[in-house]
Amino acid sequence: MKNKLIINADDFGISHEVNEAITLCFNRHYINQTTIMVNMPYLDEAVKLSQDNGFSDQVGLHLNLVEGKPLTEGIRDTIFCDDNGMFISKIMKTPKYRLMLNKKTRDCVRCEIEAQIKAFLDLGIGRKHLDSHQHSHVNPSILEVLFPLLEMYDFEDVRLSRNLPLGKINGIKKVLKASVNNQITHYNNAHSKRVIFGFGSMQDINDTRTFKGLTEMMVHPIVRDGKLSEAFADVSLDEWWDENEGVFELI
């Protein structure tokens, strides 16, 4: 029996090379979902490609609080942005900010998240799924702000925190991830027909192999020198599917 898998291509809209690669992946049936970044320069191209190639109903929101220009003014005057008003990624790598934000910053983050949700819905494509660039949404400080907005805009589901391979995440990280994933699973169970068991990278999936239920794998396709590649793995998606075609079934 094949393992059931969702393969999501992150970063749709970030560049022409990524947009081209994600479109190729859909056309070759390597992926069945993607998530789009609404504050990136190749957003319009991404939307058109999804419509022209018949996968516009398989696009979710890739919330972005760590790269590029925000959609709102307030957050530009917080720790999330540099002196030029551009997002900086290091904030979501700082433990204290991953756990807690002051009220002013929290309110500005809420406004930015809501602006990105509205911008996504205004595209008129996709399904109400959310994940995030560099996994910022699974930080407790962000998740606290996010859940009420997901409820308000009737989102169906949200990506888990990485929990694969089983047995290799230990200590305080395991405790924190379990707490976050309990909250996300509770939300998903109440709003979605899909119950997701696990989430990880291509390497995580390779290391796990057998799953208790529907599992999500994230990929980062990009076209380099005319070749479809994976930005963060040595093996390409062509090669991965050649090795795993009889093992996994896209759901």
Image: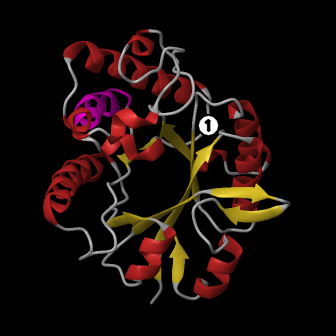
User: Which stretch did the figure color magenta?
Assistant: 141-153
Q: Quadrant of residue 141?
A: top left
- Above or below, 162 against 84 in this view is below
Instruction: Determine if residue 156 is in view.
Output: no
Q: Is the magenta region chiefly helix, strand or loop? A: helix
Q: Between residue 55 and residue 218, name the one nearer to us.
A: 218
Residue at 32% x, 54% y is: 161
Which percent across, then down, holds residue 165?
33, 74
Residue at 14% x, 58% y is: 172
User: What residue is shown with label 1?
Assistant: 125
Q: Quadrant of the N terminus?
A: bottom left
Residue at 53% x, 28% y is: 121
Q: Confirm whether the magenta stretch covers residue 148.
A: yes
Which percent across, then down, holds residue 124?
61, 31
- Above or below, 8 against 1 in this view is above
Question: Secondary structure under badge 1?
Answer: loop
